[in-house]
Image: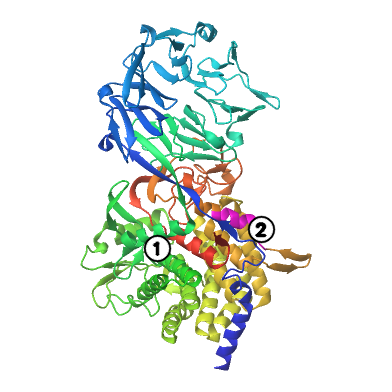
Amino acid sequence: MLKLLGIGLLAAAFGAALAQRAAGDAQGLEPVRVGPFHAEVAAFYGTDDGLPGGEVVCLAVAGGAVFAGAGQGLARFESGAWHGLPEFEGRRVDALAADAGALLAVSGGTVYRIAEGQVAALATLPDAIAGPGRVRSIAPGTPVYLGADAGLFELSEGAVAPVDALNDQLGAAPAIREVAVAADGEVAVAASAGLYVRAAGGAWARLFPCQRGRSWAPVDVRCVGFDGVGRLWFGSPQGVGCRDDAWRLYTGAEGLPYNDFTALHAGTGGLVWFGTAIGAIRYDGTEWAYREGRRWLPDNAIRDVAVTADGTAWFATGKGVGAIEQRPMTLKQKAARFQEAICTRHERTPYRYVQSVRVDRPGDASTWHNRDDDNDGQYTGMYGAAQCFAYAATKDPAAKERATAAFEALRFLVEVTQGGTPPAPPGFVARTILPTDGPDPNATPAYSEEHDRERQATSDRLWKVIHPRWPRSADGKWYWKCDTSSDELDGHYFLYARYYDLVAETDEEKERVRDVVRKVTDHLLAHDLRLVDWDGRPTRWANFSPGSLNHDPNWWPERGLNSLSILGHLRVAAHVTGDEKYAAAADELARKHAYAMNGMYPKNQRGPGSYVQFDDEMAFMNYYNLLLYETDPQLRSMYALSCFQYWELEACERNSFLNFAYAACCAGESVPTPWGDVDVSPGQQCLEDAVDTLKRYPVDRFNWRHTNSHRTDIVPLPEYVRDPGDAAGCGHRVDGTPVPIDERSFHVWADDPWRLDTGREGEMLEDGSAYLLAYYMGLYHGFIDEE
């Protein structure tokens, strides 16, 4: 008993540094103050919502209302729906513009002015530009300008005439894409022949933007506009230009995501939206944001852009109108939104395993189908850890109930393997479960012995051949999946420790944790640190044996991470049970078998972007456990230095979970070396990046496809960083960071952010448990201060 007590007291003493970082103590780091921010939420509208038929061609905001011109009419958005204007029913509308609260429209060879419900014809177009689609742009003023494929025209005193002073300069390329008029009367024209302006009362002149010796002679100019402070913006295949006191030119090298422009809206506050042939771009004067794919748009080909006073951006496309709303939201409100969705759709079986769901119609969450996953244990464990942090930070009894349910779900994965057909050794952990009143998974080809042998012969010579892969439980109610991997154990031990420390309050609750931790850890100790299946052989991946990791070349790639994992598991077992044998086993591995040294380099890496990212998630769960419970100062210093060096590799990914885990482990830490102490503490940017990613975390959780490989701001990942062929299709932005979380498909923190083209067709609805884990972890450790 004295030995058990001693281990517990020593663990508590050495874990004090990490424990103190909870409950608002960020160890010298300033908490990131986060008030309400603008979360982007997309909405799509089609003919079912009142839009006219045909492709939507143009948009305008007039009198505070949004108008859309389409192939078969004109509609106004009001009270959440579109209402057609009967005067334009069945008629194509080619161009729209606001005119002092009124609306100008070009349709059927006529220019109209619409004000206070009255439609008045202003002029008939000349034959040269009277056909459908020939007028591309209309700009209000005196005169009214019309940009057409035959040049620039002006409407004055009821007549439309060509502007010969400009058209003569355009030569053989007369097409005008857009016309804009500034508050001071200056007119700018985006033309096939170039960029042209005319000051009020002046002559037309072509512009040749120049910045610090870089000079453009832009041609094929696609869009132009003046913002609220009078700056001139244009877009062309060369890039984007902005004229203020001087020119500023933007290409992919300056972060411009794409350059096949179709439209521009330059509004107040320096915010500019661009439409392109593949998505929309927003620039706020500091950062470029790329909005592409069905998460953001009904269709990627943008025809026009308009922005309302509340900041909502509207997009005309061939598949309807899209809107991206800037909705005020807090991190807490976003967490509540995800939590409600999880409780509604994502909990499977009475044990409430949390996983993504399939939907019947892409983007429609009204009907869904739960599914099993090989990683149900790991990700339910991480979801449960999120609830543990939530309870510790907020004392919300609902969080405790959810944490307890997650713990019991993982505990059942240990119990279900016992006494069935066939039974597994005591302490064996199942991957997941399925009810036996459904189809027998063993009957599917993917779980046949033949499939296993084919995989072993063609792609993984260590792949395990085992049948049935889904044994039955002793009570006959469940199939349980075997061949459990090391990442499942990482998720289990991560939750066991968090639940024991932060949620379990009674002796009975704590004893349930001790019981399952003993069973699983004793299984590992009894089987040479391997997870041994019902067939008496180790599983494919859960192998922590020194004979394998240190002496079998097949296992050398896993040496570092698996050493880190088993050290963490044993330290959790020592902490939870107080049994010295687990601490002794960890110490023997660390010293006699060099697992501490192995753990110094848990990832075989060749620089930022090294594969695989799910190893990163596993590593930082284990760092968290090790640095909380390791009792030896020298070993703890080694693990802290390892964590710091690992995070330096990951810092550019701006991963909220990895950042907060690293900060919790290393804030305020220094490591002694022969050359002096090394500061391994995170900088403030670590927390800022983590919070920024949480803000960006998309509220739309469908697995929409995102393509980024065509972008102009992407640098391909060097081939040497990954195994042959795997670097293809990977890259990062010109600033060295991967594509942000809101510009790619995302499910869990283990997703590969370097992969440029991601996602599918919206047939899966992902849960938001990854957000909950990072958010509540940051809140618990005092890294987030919500105003």
Q: Which span is picked out in magenta?
A: 681-691
Instruction: Please name the residue shown 29% across and 67% down the image.
Output: 349
What amino acid is found at the position of numbered circle 2 in the picture?
Gly
In this rendered view, identify the residue nearer to me: 737 or 366. 366
Instruction: Please name the residue shown 42% across and 60% down the image.
Output: 769
Q: Which mark is residue 206?
A: none
In this rendered view, identify the residue nearer to me: 251 or 691. 691
On the image, the x and y values in percent for residue 758 come to 43, 45
Residue 372 seen in the current view? no
What amino acid is found at the position of numbered circle 1 in the picture?
Asn
SS for dot 1: loop
Q: CA distance from mark 1 to mark 2?
A: 33 Å
Q: Quadrant of residue 581?
A: bottom right
Q: Please give left or right for residue 19 compared with residue 419 in the image.
A: right
Q: Please give left or right for residue 162 compared with residue 477 in the image.
A: right
Instruction: Please name the residue shown 62% across and 29% down the image.
Output: 249
The residue that label 1 is drawn on is: 375
SS for dot 2: loop
On the image, the x and y values in percent for residue 644 come to 64, 62
Residues packed near mark 1 inside 10 Å, few (<14), some (14 to 19) or many (20 plus): some
Q: Please give left or right for residue 26 compared with residue 310 in the image.
A: right
